[in-house]
Image (cartoon, rainbow, N blue to C red):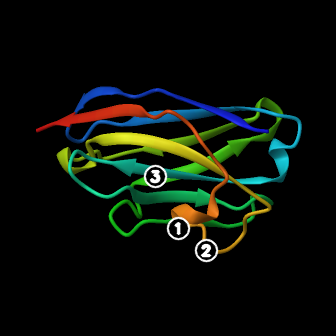
Amino acid sequence: QVQLVESGGGLVQAGDSLRLSCAASGRTFSTYAVGWFRQAPGREREFVAALSWTATSTDYGDSVKGRFTISRDIAKTTVYLQMNSLKPEDTAVYYCAASRFGSTGLGTREKYDYWGQGTQVTVSS
């Protein structure tokens, strides 16, 4: 069993940076890939970024490539999403998710076994 708790969301202005954290509990968390998704009102949940369970590969959604970076601190069982050059269209609830031994196809929601409750990010223009 893995429990995920997101934090770090807030209200920022366009061009600002924000770092989200995903804190995990569970002894086997090191065997999970972690992904970030986001959902804006009235829209489908969208893939943002993912890190394979070996932490050797990453993947990003087209809309965030070059601006967002996913990373992991295994010792603290925390995964981060560094978001730079934020735009109003980045406004959404951001969710982290965990996929056991995940390494490929991490852009699809069905790959994930556990989800956090989400943290709101609002970017004003």
Type of amino acid under label 1: Thr
Identify the residue position indicated by label 2 in the image: 105
Locate residue 71 relative to residue 15 in the image: left or right. Answer: right
Tell me the residue at 41%/62% (across/down): 66
Identify the residue position indicated by label 3 in the image: 37
Q: Which mark is residue 108?
A: 1
Q: Position of residue 96 (x, y in %)?
A: 55, 44
Q: Position of residue 92 (x, y in %)?
A: 30, 42
Question: Which residue occupies the extreme bottom position in the image?
Answer: 104
84 over 22 or under it: above or below: below
Separation (CA) of disc 1 from disc 2: 6 Å
Tell me the residue at 63%/64% (across/down): 111
36 over 106 or under it: above or below: above
Q: Position of residue 57 (x, y in %)?
A: 68, 67
Type of amino acid under label 2: Gly
Figure quadrant of the N terminus: top right
110 over 73 or under it: above or below: below
Q: Which mark is residue 57?
A: none
Tell me the residue at 67%/52% (across/down): 113
Tell me the residue at 56%/33% (across/down): 21
**Circle 2 crowding by C-alpha within 10 Å: few under 14, some 14–19, many from 20:** few
Locate residue 5 relative to residue 3 in the image: left or right. Answer: left
**Circle 1 crowding by C-alpha within 10 Å: few under 14, some 14–19, many from 20:** few
